[in-house]
Amino acid sequence: MKFLRLASLDQVYSEYVQILKPISETLEVPTLESLGFVCAENVFASQDLPGFDKSLVDGYAVRSKDTIGASPNLPVMLRLALEVKIGEEPIGSINENEAAWVATGAMLPSGADAVVMVEHTQRFNEYVEVMKPVASGENVLRKNEDVKRGQAAVTRGERINPGHLQLLLQLGVERLRVFRRLRVGVISTGDEIVEPFVKEKSLVQVRDSNSYGLVAWLKSLGFEANRVGLCRDDEGEMFRTLKSWFNEYDVLVVSGGSSIGARDFTEAAIDRLGKPGVLFHGILIQPGKPTILAIVDDKPIVGLPGNPVSFTISTKFVLLPIMRRLEGEKDFLFKSSGMVKLTRNVSSRQGREQFIRVKLFEKQGQVWAEPLESETAQVSNLTRADGVIRVPSNVEGLSSGELAEFYPLWFGW
Amino acid sequence: MKFLRLASLDQVYSEYVQILKPISETLEVPTLESLGFVCAENVFASQDLPGFDKSLVDGYAVRSKDTIGASPNLPVMLRLALEVKIGEEPIGSINENEAAWVATGAMLPSGADAVVMVEHTQRFNEYVEVMKPVASGENVLRKNEDVKRGQAAVTRGERINPGHLQLLLQLGVERLRVFRRLRVGVISTGDEIVEPFVKEKSLVQVRDSNSYGLVAWLKSLGFEANRVGLCRDDEGEMFRTLKSWFNEYDVLVVSGGSSIGARDFTEAAIDRLGKPGVLFHGILIQPGKPTILAIVDDKPIVGLPGNPVSFTISTKFVLLPIMRRLEGEKDFLFKSSGMVKLTRNVSSRQGREQFIRVKLFEKQGQVWAEPLESETAQVSNLTRADGVIRVPSNVEGLSSGELAEFYPLWFGW
């Protein structure tokens, strides 16, 4: 482990987040309640999906070779041999120049290898005129084309989303082994900080929004989070607080304290707690630079900047990846959700990755981003931003009309 | 109200979703538990944010005009008049050629209008050498620059995200009036459908993944959702089921039944229930076409296609906007989260908007989308997709390397 002091975000990911040891405790939950958990097992399909050749449309199951050359002017005439209802197995099969009515979702009778949509047919009593040829397999989902019996349907390390849930239910998987939820303890710090709802406060006191806001945010993402205390800017108090909560949580977060003095005592308290202690005291991102990353006895301790905007960016791009990694998620980094065109130039400081809050809008089929005022201390901007663009550290700025990588800040709304 | 039968997605939004009447019931919740609710009031700031001119860095508060011309070779020498700690009001002010030490977050003493970062200074006992000029306001967040007392900080119709929460806490807002959560009842339908965990089933029976999957998904988004029943393909049974749950829920969803026959009886049952009944029986999207939209006594009833992929697309782009609208959300439509470059050509059917599932990856600072096999009946694809690209209805297809609008399918992970 290298004892770097100031690191790029990529270094943080590869040299800190990557080496963290995921929790090993798992539990079994009803699949119906598994959404948002990280899967702790490979789930192998106990059946084929679909279990039979299934029609994707309402129409006539046919032997595709019987339809060769069919057209509205020269339709092919087939005999209606049977009708297959959804939920029933076909009684009988079809032979040369025969067809079977199949509803969407119904099973193809043996002999048939394709389905002609009802729109391309005309029915005359026991006969069907087919006006369009079909290729073998057309409008059919073949047996096990979706999932093959024995195949891994969901694998260890995937966070269960509604798509996984659908698949697990289709396979009849009733219970699922998942990693338990991560437990996070949040400690607030700062001589200026007061509880958010105090009635009387002095002009320079600041209501604590970070620690409570973080706890609510983490809970909404499914984590177990508690705000465990408010510390004065005092090394001894911080040390005692960290120590008393150390065994209760998987991650400890110290929120606040971006001034040199406040950071110094936080770092000293962490280093007193155990080895290796503080590994990075600053990340080359803007905002979010005064982020402290430590490990004590294999447990991460994260110091987040006090400024609410820096706090939010650090949470999104540093703390959440740490937590996703610890919960056993295979792909623990956030991906960009696409590129956006800038409505105006943005300048950036070389040597730092910059995250600029933007508001998105669509115009003529293109997605544009309006950079919000870049003053990082403005909390009100957070309520207006859809997310942030990421300006690489080797770039001096981006021009109006250029494409930038976008990351949503919150959830999918 | 127009009685259209088949509509574009835009028509659905403007002629159906837009005219739905949001619920009027509100409740008061602790702000700390307001995340995800839609705000039902305009919250006016009871105080300025910040409440004082605040330093954004560690350094020296100065009169900016005293620093004119300062450089490393010709530094300006200022007398250190006082020191301001965070959380304390300055005792004293500064005069010409004086400076005050301020920590990040500390209040500027009167007389000062800017802060020189500590990195650009050198201290000699009671004197400070300033090696860089600062402009008025530099490194300072001025009183009420973030939020002005009396200004609307959060407004009616905004869904509370962690940014709003931060702001509300900073303002000391303890309780918030929000719209109550929407209640959704989900009815499953189909002769082939069996409960997901039955031990014995015939080859052609299908485990019900849609209705249970939807309920879990909606709950994870904060809605109240219940799966209220499983109906055979029978108009009478469907009518009785709809009727018995009609008063319990704000929206009723009928899941499944994409074959002509199944849709016919669902529509007939809805029309029997009341006026105006079914307004659209099909949307010009692919997948998701067999979506039924009805209104009975001002209450929306939505029929979602049985195919799990169509089901998911219809939920995302039709059902969720309806629910967001009903919960009072001002911006109830999903925005694209950016554009992505296609790794290969995709073809599309003119006259239908197409949603193609893709997997995203980054290469050289660009976001690429790999289209997954387009077979809409494959559930397993849902687990691999990050989201969908939207191909407009007037386009025949998109070419490899072209930009397409991307929409995440699930939440922000």
Image (cartoon, coloured by chain):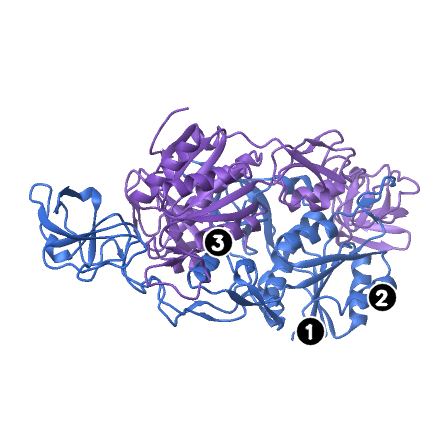
Chain colours: A blue, B purple
- The x and y percentages for residue B291 are 38, 41
- The x and y percentages for residue B219 are 56, 49
| Depth check, front residue: A299 or B53 | A299
Name the residue: 72% across, 46% down. B32
Residue that carries the numbered disc 2 in the rendered image: A240
Quarter of the image with the N terminus of chain B in it:
top left
Which circle marks residue B46 in the picture?
A: none
| Depth check, front residue: B295 or A294 | B295
Is B170 situated above or below A102? above
Residue that carries the numbered disc 3 in the rendered image: B213
Q: Quadrant of residue B25?
A: top right
Q: Secondary structure under badge 1?
A: loop
Q: CA distance from mark 3 to mark 2?
A: 46 Å
Callout 1: residue from which chain?
Answer: A
Callout 2: residue from which chain?
Answer: A
Are there few (<14), some (14-19), or many (20+) residues within 10 Å of tag 3?
many
Residue that carries the numbered disc 1 in the rendered image: A298
Quarter of the image with the C terminus of chain B in it:
bottom right
Q: Left or right of A145: which side holds B61?
A: right
Quick one: which residue is furthest to the top in this view? Answer: B1
